[in-house]
Each structure stands twice: as structure tokens, then as C-alpha cells.
Amino acid sequence: MITKNKLSGFIVFALVLGLVSMTFAGDVDRIGTAAGTQLQQPVSARDIALSGANIAMTQGVDALYWNPAGLSRLKGNAIGQFSNVTIFNDISINYLAVGANMGDFGAIGFSIKAFDFGDIPLTTNQDMDGASGKTFSPTFATTALTYSLSLSDNIHVGATAKVVYESIPRAEGTAIAFDAGLQYDNFAGINGVSFGISIKNIGSDLKYAGSALTDEVQQDNGRQDVLTREAASNALPGSIEMGVGYTSNIDEQNSLTVMTMFQSNNFEYDALRLGAEYSFDNFIYLRGGYNLTAANSEEQLYTFSLGAGITYNVGGTDLTFDYAFRPVQYFNSDNIFSLSVAF
């Protein structure tokens, strides 16, 4: 039973979401000008297989990236997940997430997403071909802390605070970002229908600084001065997402969930995502999704995705292995693997 205080909190939360959403509108003229675009790289094989359309029903640590409200719906007392994907042929993304159920207090989660670029030849104005043999590897990482609470059996809210960090030799940049989300089950009194909304990456601009932006300049009088170049400061790639999903229990063992989500971006084309998941006895899962944007076919890297999952209980511990396949235009296809352990 939802209390008066919780209802008031929900109303305020919804108003804040609405006001913030009014600041967003996809602007194709700003494509390519966002900073911290590592934030846009998705994680979790299950939701990637659904093309990210599952924000109304995503739960547990899968929800940490997609909609923080779903963390409060995690099964068991604690859960951990590791996910890996290699994108653009040789860039690897490793993702580690943990979540804990804190009872009436809600649920908390922690995640870190780190990129591995491998060794890149170091080039300079004096050695443009990298003949020295020296290499470097940039550091791109997002660390996040999430809190989620179930206001009632049907209403869930959550928020995430993130630190975005990027560095190259002798220069680095840091930004702070926030996500907020809501999920409403049995929406409009219809059993099986869920509604979700999520706002992502609202925060500070990212700006690089460091000795790489300084040069020693020889003056005519023989004096050496230090010239510092001012790096550009750019906003993070914010978005607002709204979605619905419907689960039909065909019989005691079989169920089918269909979902859709509209994503409005401030630095790229808006997108409409579609997804479906078939479940057999909460044991085997088959998934598929499709991503529609206003971009022409030459600009859109991702279209459809496919995946599967299996959950097995061992001594009271749920082990879940998920896989997703996502073709990528111009590059090798992505193969995403996730392993989750729930206690």
C-alpha cells in the first residue's frame, strides 16, 4: 500500500523528470560535438540483445546502465555481473557491477565500465610515423553509484551518480553525470503492462587539461615563455527515454514479452527501439531487437540484435549466462557476453 508521503515523493519525482525532459530535443547539427561519448556504449548482453528497448522492465544490475529504477527489483539479497564486448575490431569494454538489497531502505549498486584500447604507437611532430617504437594506451572509465527504491509493489524509482574519466599522455578530463529513472508496473491498471522513463547523463561539461596543452615558446629576446592552449569544453551526450512493455503468460512454462522505447538525444538522431523476449520455464530465453533512427543507412552503425540466455540454480545461487549478437556496419560484428551471480 503506497503511503501519502511516498505518493507525494512520486509526484515530485515525476514533475522533475518532466521539467528536465523539456530541455531535450534532438539536434542533428550538434552531432559529433559531445564529450564523454564512452557513456553511450551500452553494457549487459540481455538488454543489448533487446536493442535497449527494455527500460520499462529491466531489473537488477542490468538496470544500472539502462534505468536505475530497476535495481530495486533485483532477485535475492545480492547480485554481481561481469560483461565483456569488443567493439570496432580491437577496443574491448569490460563491465563489472554489483547490487545489494537493503530491505526497506531500498537497493544500492556500484558499477565500473572500462575501455581497453590496447597499445597505440606514440607519434609526435618530430616522429610522425612512430619510429621510436613507444606506445601508449588511453584510459576511459565510468564509475557509478546507484540507489533505487520501491515506493509500492508497482512503482520503482532510482538515481545514479557517475564519474567520467578520460586520459591520454599528459592530459586528462573529468566530468560528473547523473541518471534518474522510474518504472510503473500494471500501468493504467492493465495487468502485464509496464511503463518506464529514464533521463541520462545530466551533468558537468568535460574539459581536458594537462602539460600536453603547453609549449615552450622562444622569444626574440632569448627568453622562453610557456604557452598554454585552452581546451574546448563540451557537454555530455544526454538523453531522455520513455518505453512500455507487455508480458503475456502463455501457460505455466512459456511467456512472451514485447517492448518498445523512444529515445530523444541532445547530440544525435532520436531513436525508436523494439524488442521481444521468449522465456521457457524461467530457464531458457530467446531475444531479439531492432533500432530505428532518422539517420540514413550509411550513418547508422547498429540495426538489429539477437541473443539468448540461460539461468540455472546451484545450491540456492542463480547463475545466469547471457549472449548477444549485434552486426556493425563497416566493422566486425559485436559478440557480447555477460555472467551474473545472484545470492
Image (spheres, helix red, strand yellow):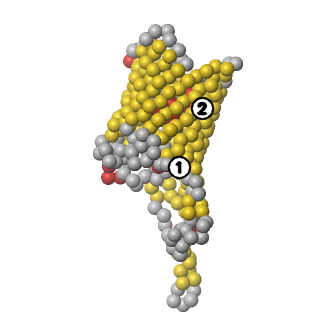
Query: Residue 253 at x, y = what percent?
Result: 50, 11
Q: Is residue 109 above or below residue 222?
A: above
Q: Is residue 321 above or below residue 28?
A: above
Q: Residues within 10 Å of mark 2 (few under 14, many from 20)?
A: some
Residue 223 or residue 96, whichever sits in front = 96
Residue type of the residue flagged with mark 1: Ile
Picture residue at 56% right of the left edge, 89% below the top = 222
Picture residue at 47% right of the left edge, 13% below the top = 254
Tell me which corner region of the image, top left, top right, bottom left or bottom right, holds residue 337. top right
Q: Is residue 330 visible?
A: yes
Q: Considering the numbered disc 2 on the image, is that residue within a helix, a strand or a loop?
A: strand
Q: Considering the numbered disc 1 on the image, is that residue within a helix, a strand or a loop?
A: strand
Nearer-N-terminus badge (2/1): 1
Residue type of the residue flagged with mark 2: Leu
Q: Residue furthest right?
A: 315
Residue 91's tag is: 1
